[in-house]
Image (tube, rainbow, N blue to C red):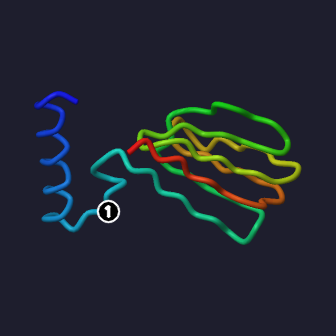
Amino acid sequence: MSKARRAAGLLKRRFTELSDLPRELVGSSSRMVLMGNSEFMIENYDGVLEYEESRIKLSTKTGIISVAGNKLTIDELDDENLMVRGKIYSITIESEE
C-alpha cells in the first residue's frame, strides 16, 4: 500500500472519529442488517460474485460476504444497496485485512 493511500485511510478514520458520523457514511465500510432469518440487507457493496439458490457471495471493499440458505433471491435496491431474501442459515465475512 502506498504512503498516500495509508495517509488517506488514516485521515478518513480520524475524520469519522471526530465527526461522530457512522463509518459507512464516511468510508468504505458496509452496513449489514439481518431481519429474522429471512431478510439480509447490505449497504455499500461492490458486486455479486456468485448467485445460486443456496449461496450468494457479495464483494465489498473490506472483503467477501457469503450468505448461505435455501431459496435465496436478490432484490436490488440501487447501485450500492441490495436485499437478500429466503431462508438464511448463515452469513460469513471473509475480511481482506
Q: Nearer the viewer, residue 77 or 52?
A: 52
Mark 1 element type: loop
State which quadrant residue 77 falls in: top right
* Placement of 40 over or under 2, stated as above or below: below
Q: How many marks?
A: 1
* Placement of 91 over or under 76, stated as above or below: below
Q: Provide residue 75's location: percent of width, then percent of height.
A: 71, 44
Q: Provide residue 61's location: percent of width, then percent of height.
A: 42, 39
Label 1 crowding class (10 Å Cα cut-off): few <14, some 14-19, many 20+? few
Q: Nearer the viewer, residue 89 or 34?
A: 89
The residue positioned 54% from the left and 37% from the top of the image is 59
Q: Provide residue 36's location: percent of width, then percent of height.
A: 72, 72
* In-image side of 75 versus 32 (left or right): right
Which quarter of the rendered picture does the N terminus lie within? top left
Point out the residue furthest to the bottom here: 36
Point out the residue furthest to the right here: 71
The residue positioned 78% from the left and 61% from the top of the image is 89
Q: Provide residue 60's location: percent of width, then percent of height.
A: 48, 40
Name which residue type carries label 1. Pro
* In-image side of 67 versus 15 (left or right): right
* In-image side of 87 versus 10 (left or right): right
Which quarter of the rendered picture does the C terminus lie within? top left
The residue positioned 45% from the left and 51% from the top of the image is 30
Point out the residue furthest to the top here: 2
Residue hosting label 1: 22
* In-image side of 81 versus 36 (left or right): left
* Placement of 41 over or under 73, stated as above or below: below
